[in-house]
Image (tube, grey):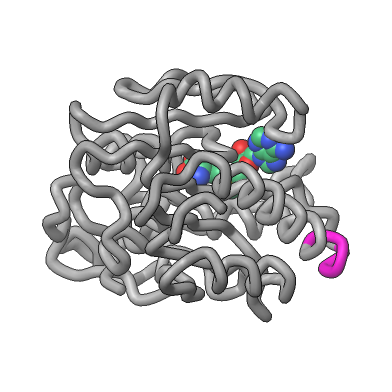
Amino acid sequence: MAGPRGSSGKRAGASAPTGSDPSEVMGGGRLMTVRVKTAKKRTVSSTLWLQRQLNDPYVIEAKRRGYRSRAAFKLEQLDDKFHLLAKGGRIVDLGCAPGGWCQIAVDRVGPKGKVVGIDYLEMEPVEGAQTIQLDFLDPTAPDILKQMLSGLADVVLSDMAAPTTGHTQTDHLRVMGLAEVAYEFAAEVLAPGGAFVAKVFQGGTERSLLDRLKKDFALVRHAKPPASRTDSAEVYVVATGFRGRK
Ligand SMILES: C[S@@+](CC[C@H](N)C(=O)[O-])C[C@H]1O[C@@H](n2cnc3c(N)ncnc32)[C@H](O)[C@@H]1O
């Protein structure tokens, strides 16, 4: 998969980042490493986090392009590889705040497409997308999303992740739980030929979900887009060619 591209699908700069090395070349210029001094109230880990953010080429490029999140590049890269977001496509974005994936989806499906999103966090509206602030696990959420869609979806995306606890197993179970609930919904709204993308953890998708996806889709793959940090355990399951509702 390539590095950051323009929203038109064209390469934005001369060289693309290859990892998280902050000094790598991007947009044709060499980036200076920003060092953050520890302030009295700042812990070492938050100083390191801030330093990584300030030097992260994807963060810098996201800011330059007006993307809400560096995560926007993950969807861009997944779409470049798997061709999920066709013009006129109908997309559901689960866990959409602050809106980076919505921005990419709106751009790629164009004015004839439709993008609906849900997140329990408040977010600024994304032009061209319809979003709602609600917990996806709320029993009313699926019907509300279906009303917003008013028809079937071509792609259901889930980048949902609960705040991490630091306990790997707990975090893993939570992400997998969200992916499973996301697929329960996707199986109800996807049009034949549709696609499902969900954040899971390294080691792959839970066996029961994976078996189900393999039965329901023509192709099931796992991908870690370059914009996904190498020290993060996240990967995405990408299922394409939905065989239709049973
Ligand atoms: C990694 S962020 C998504 C970033 C987004 N793809 C973007 O590009 O801006 C994960 C999001 O999932 C949301 N989330 C987690 N659990 C959720 C739930 N049960 N219902 C709705 N949103 C949820 C979080 O609030 C968070 O905003």
Residue plotted at (32% across, 42% down)? 104
Frontmost residue, 71 versus 133: 133
Frontmost residue, 78 versus 91: 91
In x, y percent, where is residue 165?
A: 84, 54
Name of the residue lying farthest toward the front = 246
In the figure, 106 relative to 150: above or below?
below
For the N terminus, which image quadrant?
Answer: bottom left
Q: What's the magenta bit mostly, secondary-structure-wise?
A: helix
In the figure, 131 relative to 24: above or below?
above
Residue plotted at (40% across, 70% down)? 226
Query: To which quarter of the image does residue 227 belong?
Result: bottom left
In x, y percent, where is residue 98?
A: 51, 33
In x, y percent, where is residue 34?
A: 45, 57
Q: Is residue 42 left or right of residue 194?
A: right
Residue plotted at (56% across, 53% down)? 246
Query: To which quarter of the image does residue 213 belong?
Result: bottom right
Frontmost residue, 105 versus 195: 195
In the figure, 75 relative to 227: above or below?
above
Which quadrant does ligand 1 occupy? Answer: top right
Q: Is residue 12 left or right of residue 59?
A: left
Query: In this figure, what is the number of numbered marks?
Result: 0
Residue plotted at (32% across, 21% down)? 127
Query: To which quarter of the image does residue 22 belong?
Result: bottom left
Is residue 32 visible to the viewer in this orientation of the structure? no
Is residue 143 visible to the viewer in this orientation of the structure? yes
| Magenta span includes 76 | no
Frontmost residue, 168 versus 148: 148
The residue stretch that appears in magenta: 167-171
